[in-house]
Image: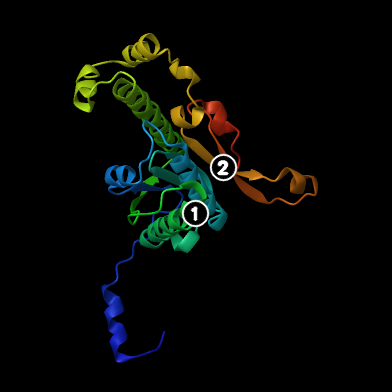
Amino acid sequence: MANTKFQYVRCFEESDACLPDTYMVVRIDGRGFTKFCKAHDFKKPNDKRALDLMNCCALQILNDFPDIVLAFGESDEYSFLFKRKSKVFNRRRSKITSSIVSLFSACYVFHWNEFIDTPLKQVPQFDGRLVLYPNDQVMRDYFRWRQADCHINNLYNTTLWNLVLKGNLTLADATEELKGTLSKDKNEILFSKFQINYNNEPEIFRKGSVALQMLNTEEKRQKKAKFVPEIYHIDIMKDGFWEKLNCIK
């Protein structure tokens, strides 16, 4: 940077480096996506095309940021986990968050036509936050929370929209009917009224999407430790899943 009399303004910049030896998680969320989904006629209760587009963007993030070892996505949100020892961008909170959000947003627009046949009518927007988690237990519970949220929301929306689309209720009436119901009640409504066994619904809807950095099997045989991001729809609640991940530290 040129040495000029104006560079004193840099003294107003605040240091925002994240604490060392903590897990950094960046979560992005669609902003105004209720209107965005309506404008583009996304299917209810789930539009797999839109989820596949989100997963495509997440894979691009993992490709560009090797220190991200795991990500979890549902609906219009995605959470990205950095290695605990990561020093990406000197752990600067604003730099990390803005880079993830901007790349994800750009990918969403760039790959839109590969997944959605409706022309893009509005600018998709995402916001982001970076949160630090101090240890393995808290970090794991964060991702368990997001998968539990995925299940709860999807069960509700699946029941709600079946009542509307197949049960011919208004949205207001369907919402009223589900007020105060438990998971078992929603499962009963789906099975008794629409012959839907919720456990047979696609796992991408019930469990969300997990992006992992996995060793390429061919290159592993050649003793080249190159990781390739892949998408899975699996249960991350049990300790067994986390104990198998040896790349998080």
| Residue denoted by label 1 | 111
Q: Is residue 28 visible?
A: yes
Question: Residue 146, relative to residue 191: is it above or below?
Answer: below
- Name, please, the residue furthest toward the top: 192
Q: Residue at x 50, y 19 (%)?
A: 200
The mark closer to the camera, 1 or 2, is 1
Q: Which quarter of the figure has residue 42?
A: top left
- Pointers 1 and 2 in contact (CB under 8 A)? no
Q: Residue at x 34, y 29 (%)?
A: 153
Tell me where residue 114 appears, x and y as whole percent: 52, 50
Depth check: 84 or 61 in front? Answer: 61
Quadrant location of the N terminus in the rendered image: bottom left
Instruction: Label 1: state its secondary structure.
Output: loop
Tell me where residue 108 appears, x and y as whole percent: 44, 53
Tell me where residue 231 appears, x and y as whole percent: 56, 40
Q: Residue at x 35, y 41 (%)?
A: 41
Tell me where residue 77 appears, x and y as whole percent: 38, 43
Instruction: Label 2: state its secondary structure.
Output: strand
Q: Choose the circle earlier in sequence order: 1 or 2.
A: 1
Looking at the rendered structure, the kind of residue marked 2 is Leu
Depth check: 88 or 197 in front? Answer: 197
| Residue denoted by label 2 | 212
- Name, please, the residue furthest toward the right: 222
Tell me the CA gap for discs 1 and 2.
Answer: 21 Å
Looking at the rendered structure, the kind of residue marked 1 is His
Apparent side of residue 97 relative to residue 218 in the rendered image (left or right): left
Depth check: 64 or 87 in front? Answer: 64
Q: Residue at x 39, y 14 (%)?
A: 194
